[in-house]
Amino acid sequence: MSSHQPPHRSAAGPAGGFSPRTPDAPRAAHTATSPAALCGLLAEEDRLRVYAAVVLGASGLAAVESATGLPARTVAAAVRRLQQGGLLGVADGGLRADIEVFKDSVRAHAAAPAQVEPMDPDRQRDQILRTFVVDGRLTQMPAAHGKRMVVLEHIAASFEPGVRYPEREVNAVLRAWFDDYAALRRYLVDSDLLSRADGTYWRTGGPVTV
């Protein structure tokens, strides 16, 4: 009676020691592995080489050993760890890389979109403002009078009603909105949103929040 045993399969389960997790089968509900955990699995060089070999077509332990040059024990340990992390499975008796785990991870751990505060409670005015005001800066002055007034009224709200501002302070406020602060100041005055006398300015128009 011969004592010869097939290489790499002693004390192993089917297909040379990998557990029968089949990526092609319907998945049970589970918590998706986090992107950080997946990166951690592949940060170890031996596991990365084993995973790459399977991605490139090695479907058995012997083929992975040949492709990576790693010893059988190292390959078997890497395969087990990659299976536990969901990166490898078994299909048709051979190893298969389960690439869907990356998509699952991104979908499950994607950050929720930030809630954007409206610039104006009126939807139409808010849309106009978002077109011309980006990151708190006026990108360009609207050519259409109606849209220009929406933008100017929004900027005029930077000034408190009943407060008189010296010109240098007005310029500092408007420079934060637009590089050509002098033109912006003229627009506000011509639109009766700011008034001026003796080098001081005060707000005379635009909606007031109460």
Image (cartoon, rainbow, N blue to C red):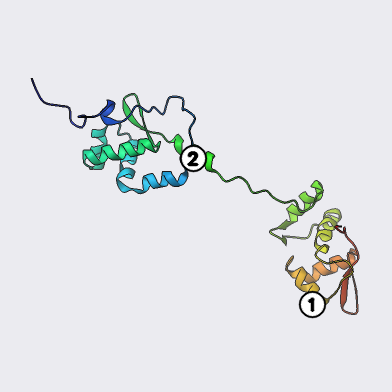
Q: Quadrant of the C terminus?
A: bottom right
Q: Quadrant of residue 172?
A: bottom right
Look at the picture and state if 179 lies above or below 17.
below
Tell me how far mark 2 sits from mark 1, CA to CA: 54 Å
In the drawing, what numbered circle is on residue 168? Answer: 1
Instruction: Kindly identify which residue carries mark 2.
Output: 105
* Residue depth check, mark 2 versus mark 1: number of the one nearer the observer: 2
Question: In the image, 24: left or right of 80?
Answer: right
Residue at horizontal 64 percent and vertical 49 percent from the top: 114
Number of marks present in the image shown? 2
Element type where label 1 sits in the image:
helix
What label sits on residue 210 in the rendered view?
Answer: none
Where in the figure is residue 22, as x and y percent of width and height?
39, 27
Measuring 24% from the left and 38% from the top, which residue is drawn there? Answer: 65
Decide if residue 65 is on the left or right side of residue 87. left
- In the rendered structure, which amino acid carries the disc numbered 1? Arg
Q: Position of residue 80 (x, y in %)?
A: 32, 36
State whether residue 171 is above or below residue 141: below
* Residue 182 falls in image quadrant: bottom right
In the image, residue 178 sits, relative to residue 131, either above or below, namely: below
